[in-house]
Amino acid sequence: MIGNSARSTSMRTALGRVRHLGSAKEGVHHWWMQRLTALALVPLVLWFVVSLAGMSGMDHAAATAWIGSPSVAITLVLLIGATFYHAQLGVQVVLEDYIHNEGLKLAALVLVKFASIVLSVAAIFAVLKIAFGG
């Protein structure tokens, strides 16, 4: 009977065995985060769409008061955070799969992560500014 360590060693490529390289295990975390954010987005997006549909004809003051409600502001912040994180993870997969130049791939990944952070912080700031009456 072959032990787990012998079996896992035999499953690696010859170069991987020489360099002692195995799976970085980052793919599993990325996969789980993509699924968890997708799961979180289902009720959040449904809530947002239903809320927007119910606001037809609402004026600016009423919309501001709606966003200023603590439960709405918290839910909007969750929606924004989950949306931008989910989008960043998805775009990262596309870039890693289709950009083969390592320098260009790294630059694109950094740009996408930076844009995701900046845009999500700006959107959360806008919600909080309305919620706290700034």
Image (cartoon, helix red, strand yellow):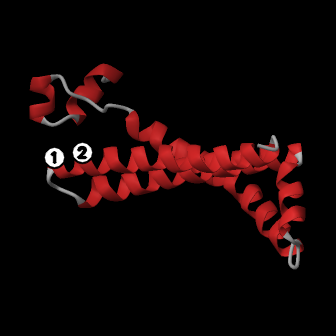
At label 2, counting other C-alpha atoms closer than 10 Å, the crowd grade (few under 14, some 14-19, many 20 or more) is some
Q: Which of these two is toward me, 129 or 8?
A: 129
Quadrant of the frame with the N terminus: top left
Q: Which mark is residue 31?
A: none
Q: Residue furthest bottom?
A: 57
Badge 2 marks a residue whose secondary structure is helix
Q: Position of residue 46 (x, y in %)?
A: 77, 64
Give the side of residue 122 with respect to residue 23, left or right: right
Q: Position of residue 115 (x, y in %)?
A: 43, 50
Amino acid identity at mark 2: Leu
Residue at the location (24% across, 45% down)? 106
Residue at the location (28% across, 57% down)? 97
Badge 1 marks a residue whose secondary structure is helix
> Residue at label 2?
106
Give the side of residue 127 with respect to residue 16, left or right: right
Residue 3 visible in image: no
Amino acid identity at mark 1: Gly
Residue 92 visible in image: yes
Q: Position of residue 133 (x, y in %)?
A: 82, 44
Q: Position of residue 109 (x, y in %)?
A: 32, 47
Q: Which mark is residue 103?
A: 1
Q: Which of these two is toward me, 42 or 112?
A: 112
* Mark 1–mark 2 CB contact (< 8 Å): yes
